[in-house]
Image (spheres, rainbow, N blue to C red):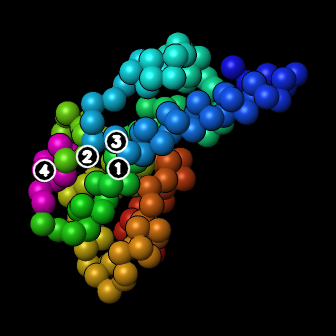
Amino acid sequence: MTSRLDPARHLRDLVLLRRVRDRIDREYAQPLDVEALARGVNLSAGHLSREFRKAYGESPYGYLMTRRIERAMALLRRGDLSVTEVCFAVGCASLGTFSTRFTELVGVPPSVYRRQASDATAELPSCVAKQVTRPIRNREAPAAGPPVA
């Protein structure tokens, strides 16, 4: 997809990748898969995955799940929805998969996060709370302790 020999093609390819990323950002709660995302920009799923990872450092599916978990964190901080309701609200079809992925990205299970984060961010403006509680990859997550500083 990206060609170092043709700068115009490289820019066109980056536009396609940005469209995919923007679609994920807009439609994170919808049923999305890599094949559907690739069809939307006329690429094969494998090619899209490779080029997306090169451009953004993670696969389209990884990016989608990060957006879903990020939104789930905001909903859990509000405290008015159960973990199951949050799971389905962000587009996850399986509570087990949601909980596993949430724990991998955040470092604690969603139920623990809900208890800790609602107290820890109660005094912060929502824009600040979102920034300081942004999900991170498991290899970067703290081994123990609360999810917020």
Earlier residue among tags 3 and 2: 3
Answer few, some or many: residues within 10 Å of disc 4's Cα (few below 14, many 20 plus, some between 14 and 19). Answer: some
Asked if marks 3 and 1 touch (Cβ < 8 Å), the reply is no
- Report how far apart the C-alphas of labels 3 and 2 lie in the structure: 7 Å
Earlier residue among tags 4 and 1: 1
Asked if marks 3 and 2 touch (Cβ < 8 Å), the reply is yes
**Residue denoted by label 2:** 90
The residue type indicated by label 1 comes to Ile
Q: Describe residue 86's horizontal placement relative to residue 113 as left or right.
A: left
State the residue at coordinates (46%, 70%).
Answer: 132
Looking at the rendered structure, the secondary structure element under dot 2 is loop
Q: Is residue 34 above or below residue 75?
A: above
- Report how far apart the C-alphas of labels 4 and 3 lie in the structure: 16 Å
Residue 86 inside the magenta-drawn segment: yes
Looking at the rendered structure, the secondary structure element under dot 4 is helix
Asked if marks 4 and 2 touch (Cβ < 8 Å), the reply is no
Residue 135 inside the magenta-drawn segment: no
Q: Is residue 107 visible?
A: no
Location of the C terminus by quadrant is: bottom left
Asked if marks 1 and 2 touch (Cβ < 8 Å), the reply is yes
Earlier residue among tags 4 and 2: 4
Q: Point out the stretch of residues depicted in magenta.
A: 81-88
State the residue at coordinates (42%, 45%).
Answer: 25
**Residue denoted by label 1:** 69
Q: Is residue 106 above or below residue 97?
A: below
Q: Nearer the viewer, mark 4 or mark 3?
A: 3
Looking at the rendered structure, the secondary structure element under dot 1 is helix
Earlier residue among tags 1 and 2: 1
**Residue denoted by label 4:** 85
Answer few, some or many: residues within 10 Å of disc 1's Cα (few below 14, many 20 plus, some between 14 and 19). Answer: many
